[in-house]
Image: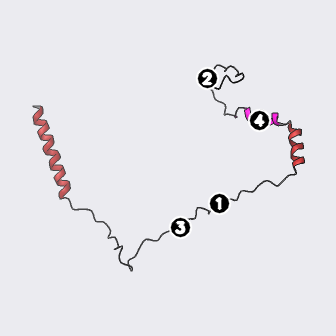
């Protein structure tokens, strides 16, 4: 009995496939002959990659003594190190943060596998 349904399905698929082949092809617009110099062609629009370019402006030059005095007033290189090590601000969430155990501090060359 199941072979009857298989044959029936195969015949249906064959009939649908042949009907699709017998259907008239859809009309496509005629394409101009690429070898004809007088043939019309679609207009090409060009948008420059530099249209929205904004020039990078360097900060004005500062005397090196003034720059050193500013770093000293801020707190030296340690201030920059603290700023770099500070965690990035995140949006508050209602979910608790996952617990990660602290890593032991590296001493000497323990982190290097030499």
Residue 75 image offset from top left, x and y in percent: 86, 35
- Dot 2 or dot 3, earlier in sequence: 3
Looking at the rendering, the stretch of residues picked out in magenta corresponds to: 77-88
- Dot 3 or dot 1, earlier in sequence: 3
Question: In this rendering, is residue 30 above or below 108?
Answer: below
Q: Could you give the CA–CA distance between mark 1 and mark 4, rounded to whole angstroms?
A: 31 Å
Task: Please state which of residues 114 and 5 is positioned toward the viewer in this rendering.
Answer: 114
User: Is the Cβ of the residue at disc 2 closer than 8 Å to that at disc 3?
Assistant: no
Q: Which residue is mark 1?
A: 53
Q: Could you give the CA–CA distance between mark 3 and mark 1, rounded to whole angstroms?
A: 16 Å
Q: Which residue is mark 3?
A: 46
- Dot 2 or dot 1, earlier in sequence: 1
* Residue 86 counted in the magenta span: yes
Mark 3 or 4: in front is 4
Q: Which residue is mark 4?
A: 83
Quadrant of residue 34 within the rendered picture: bottom left
**Secondary structure mostly seen in the magenta stretch:** helix
Residue 9 image offset from top left, x and y in percent: 15, 41
Residue 68 image offset from top left, x and y in percent: 87, 43
């Amino acid at each position: 009995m199941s072979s009857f349904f298989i044959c029936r399905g195969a015949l249906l698929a064959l009939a649908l496939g042949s009907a699709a082949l017998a259907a008239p092809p859809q009309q496509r617009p005629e394409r101009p002959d690429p070898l004809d110099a007088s043939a019309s062609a679609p207009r090409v629009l060009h948008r420059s990659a530099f249209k929205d370019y904004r020039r990078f402006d360097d900060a004005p030059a500062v005397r090196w003594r003034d720059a050193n005095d500013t770093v000293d007033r801020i707190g030296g290189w340690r201030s920059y190190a603290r700023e770099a090590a500070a965690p990035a601000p995140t949006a508050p969430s209602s979910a608790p943060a996952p617990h990660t155990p602290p890593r032991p501090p590296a001493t000497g060359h323990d982190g290097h596998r030499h």
